[in-house]
Image (cartoon, rainbow, N blue to C red):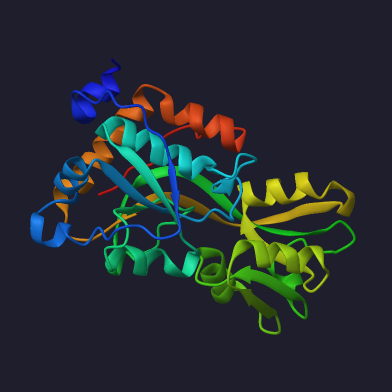
């Protein structure tokens, strides 16, 4: 038994297996029962919101099962708890409502930390630090934000990409918002926009899958630390998650996950709070 498993939960021996569910039983009973930690361990299932349309964070693999970095992260947490993970496909705009309504226990869904979001939910320490980048075909001249003026730029609604672009794009930029990453990516591939702002990991996946289009990362817009989202006011649950992440980092399980799905591991684990 690993040091991580002992410190995170003691006698966790169950091998996690993901169950893909479009609808999951409510997790809201936690409000009356106490900490989500107690509710999850008694239930035997960790209900996790993940967007399965955001490679490499969340995908549906060739066996039609949830996969990707965020799904693998959910499996690690479930393993340490000694429970089974249940994945609920959750688009970006529904991440916070799914948490606050009690539909899920946590959200692990390329979820960037922002002060505005922290008014509504709590965040764990970071599980990956990505970048927000501008992606466009090679012929498009775009070396910085100023070059977006007069251009149509695609972004997924209610994401930090949307927030950053709205705040920093020069006047005259035409921001085109889409409901999910798949629609944003398709707008770029179809020539409906000149460029998109996306996570660095997703941008790499888009370029790899569409090599004939000669897509390029034009410039870095911002850094994007990703974390696990959970409901506010649950100190025991937050403490357990951060303890578990610390031990997963110490035992290098987290770095191995980053290396597998992102192609490189962060040099350090950012922590706060």
Residue depicted at 47% across the width and 70% down the height: 93
Farthest residue in the bottom direction?
172
Looking at the image, can residue 108 be seen?
yes
| Residue 169 picture location, percent across and down | 63, 74
Residue 265 seen anywhere in this rendered image of the structure: no
Q: Residue furthest left?
A: 33
Apparent side of residue 219 relative to residue 50 in the rendered image (left or right)? right
**In the image, what residue occupies the spot 9% across and 55% down?**
33
Give the side of residue 124 with respect to residue 151, left or right.
left
Among the 4 quarters of the image, the one containing residue 153: bottom right
Q: Considering only vertical position in the picture, is 193 above or below 206?
A: below
Residue 2 is situated, as x and y percent measured from the top left of the image, at: 30, 17
Image position of 182 with respect to 11: above or below: below
Indicate whether 149 appears above or below 84: below
Q: Please determine whether, in this image, residue 40 is positioned above or below residue 173.
A: above
Residue 65: x percent and y percent?
54, 43
Q: Is residue 98 left or right of residue 237?
A: right
Query: Which quadrant of the figure has residue 154?
Result: bottom right
Residue drawn where x is 36% and y is 42% of the image: 85
> For the N terminus, which image quadrant?
top left
* Residue at x 19%, y 40% (from the top left corner): 41
**In the rendered view, does 234 fall on the left or right side of 224?**
left
In the image, 36 versus 248, the foreground residue is 36
Residue 255: x and y in percent read: 47, 29
Of 192 and 86, which appears nearest the observer? 86
Number of dots carrying numbers: 0
């Amino acid at each position: 038994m690993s040091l991580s498993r002992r410190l995170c939960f003691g006698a966790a021996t169950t091998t996690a297996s993901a169950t893909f569910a479009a609808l999951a039983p409510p997790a809201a009973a936690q409000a009356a029962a106490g900490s989500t930690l107690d509710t999850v361990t008694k239930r035997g299932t960790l209900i996790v919101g993940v967007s399965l349309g955001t490679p490499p964070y969340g995908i549906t693999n060739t066996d039609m099962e949830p996969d990707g970095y965020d799904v693998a992260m959910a499996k690690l947490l479930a393993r340490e708890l000694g429970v089974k993970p249940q994945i609920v496909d959750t688009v970006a705009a529904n991440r916070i409502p799914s948490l606050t309504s009690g539909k899920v226990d946590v959200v692990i869904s390329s979820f960037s930390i922002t002060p505005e979001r922290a008014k509504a939910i709590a965040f764990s320490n970071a599980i990956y630090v990505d970048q927000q980048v501008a992606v466009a075909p090679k012929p498009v001249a775009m070396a910085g934000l100023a070059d977006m003026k007069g251009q149509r730029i695609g972004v997924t609604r209610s994401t930090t990409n949307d927030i950053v672009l709205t705040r920093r794009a020069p006047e005259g930029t035409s921001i085109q918002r889409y409901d999910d990453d798949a629609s944003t990516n398709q707008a770029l591939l179809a020539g409906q926009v000149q460029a998109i702002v996306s996570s660095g990991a997703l941008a790499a996946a888009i370029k790899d899958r569409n090599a004939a289009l000669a897509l390029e990362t034009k410039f870095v817009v911002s850094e994007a630390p990703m974390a696990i989202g959970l409901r506010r006011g649950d100190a025991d649950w937050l403490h357990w998650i951060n303890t578990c992440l610390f031990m997963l980092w110490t035992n290098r399980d987290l770095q191995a996950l980053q290396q597998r799905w992102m192609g490189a591991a962060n040099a350090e684990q950012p922590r706060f709070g």
